[in-house]
Image (cartoon, rainbow, N blue to C red):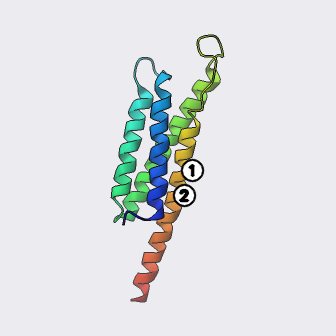
Amino acid sequence: MLQRIQTVWIFLSIIGTIFLFITGQDYSLFGPVPFISIVCVILVFLGFISILSFKDRKRQSLLNKISIFINALLLGLLAYWLLTLSGGINFPEKGIEPLFPLLSIVSLIIANVYIAKDERLVKSVDRLR
């Protein structure tokens, strides 16, 4: 059932990742490799697979945990890059890009809470039969 509340939270995570993809084009973490773009495409792909695997709640939760881990690594890399960035003439403003992985992490954690509630509900109904 695609109309569950955790689908909304996972979709919010995907939107945060898309915003990071749009705003993070000027970052160069590892030289000329578009690292943020590659990671954002992977995260969007994992999010859509997680949404479409609504029948298998364990797989959905596992995909969300993998996405949380990747977002945490990305958040750490972006925070490190912003802390080592000088505020000179070439790049006078520091961005808000680390907020998008943080938004994704929070929304995926909330989605996992609702997935666990669904799992408990299904187990309690099976016990009554």
Quadrant containing the N terminus is: bottom left
Instruction: Find the distance from the CA under tag 1 to the CA under tag 2.
Output: 6 Å
- In the displayed structure image, the side of residue 89 where residue 25 appears, left or right: left
Which of the two residues, 123 or 86, is positioned nearer the viewer here?
86
Give the answer, above or below, for where 9 lies relative to 57.
Answer: above
- In the displayed structure image, the side of residue 55 where residue 95 appears, left or right: right
Quadrant containing the C terminus is: bottom left
From this viewpoint, which residue is outermost toward the top? 89
Q: Residue 35 carries which label?
A: none
Q: Position of residue 108 (x, y in %)?
A: 50, 53
Give the answer, above or below, for where 64 lies relative to 126.
Answer: above
Residue 61: quadrant of the picture: bottom left
Q: Which mark is residue 106?
A: 1
Q: Residues within 10 Å of mark 2 (few under 14, many from 20)?
A: some
Determine contact: label 1, label 2, CB under 8 Å.
Answer: yes
Q: Residue at x 36, y 62 (%)?
A: 54
Q: Which residue is drawn at 36% across and 50% down?
A: 48
Q: Residue at x 46, y 44 (%)?
A: 15
Q: Where is residue 122 in the image (x, y as percent from the top left)?
A: 42, 76
Q: Which amino acid does label 1 sit on?
A: Val
- In the displayed structure image, the side of residue 26 where residue 2 appears, left or right: left
Q: Position of residue 119 (x, y in %)?
A: 45, 71
Q: Residue at x 59, y 16 (%)?
A: 91
* Secondary structure at numbered mark 1: helix
Q: Where is residue 80 in the image (x, y as percent from the top left)?
A: 59, 28
Can you identify the residue that label 2 sits on? 110
Q: How crowded is mark 1: few (under 14 residues within 10 Å), some or many (20 or more)?
A: some
* Secondary structure at numbered mark 2: helix
Residue 109: quadrant of the picture: bottom right
Give the answer, above or below, for where 89 lies relative to 96.
Answer: above
Residue 86: quadrant of the picture: top right
Q: What residue type is labelled 2?
A: Ile
